[in-house]
Amino acid sequence: MSYIIVLWIVWGALALVLLGLIVYRMGLTQYEEDRLFLDGGSEMQHREQDQMLAKVKRLEPMIRICGGVAGLATLAIVAFYLMDALRQF
């Protein structure tokens, strides 16, 4: 099997993982507001908000890493095809 096929498969898997992480983060923050105005009696809402923010903060490094690796794989694929085009001239 050619290494370009393996690179395409790895790129596709990374893209699916990245898409899944982004959709999961969107699901977590879909109904959240940028600012909450809580009174003293809404401790439960405050805890829920803090838990949701903790989940989102744990996701951010994974999203950045997957995005960076997918970007590098994209550059590798583009470089392969550019080198192939240059060899055919």
Image (cartoon, rainbow, N blue to C red):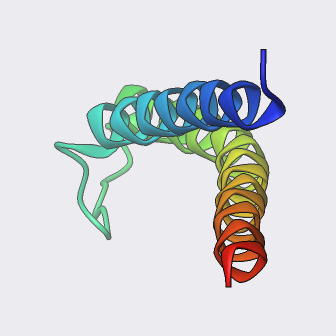
Q: Residue at x 31, y 42 (%)?
A: 26
Toward which corner of the image does residue 37 lie, by quadrant?
bottom left
Q: Does residue 15 appear to the left or right of 9 in the view shown? A: left
Quadrant containing the C terminus in the rendered view: bottom right
Q: Residue furthest left?
A: 31
In this view, 80 is above or below 57: below
Toward which corner of the image does residue 50 lie, by quadrant?
top right
Q: Position of residue 17 (x, y in %)?
A: 56, 27
Q: Does residue 11 appear to the left or right of 58 in the view shown? A: left
Q: Position of residue 34 (x, y in %)?
A: 31, 69
In this view, 89 is above or below 61: below
| 72, 62: nearer the viewer | 72
| 81, 30: nearer the viewer | 81
Q: Does residue 12 appear to the left or right of 26 in the view shown? A: right
Q: Residue at x 71, y 45 (%)?
A: 66
Q: Residue at x 63, y 34 (%)?
A: 14
Q: Position of residue 71 (x, y in %)?
A: 68, 62
Q: Residue furthest front?
A: 89
Q: Residue at x 68, y 57 (%)?
A: 77
Quadrant containing the N terminus in the rendered view: top right
User: What is the total number of numbered labels drawn onto the structure image?
Assistant: 0
| 9, 46: nearer the viewer | 9
| 81, 22: nearer the viewer | 81
Q: Position of residue 59 (x, y in %)?
A: 65, 39
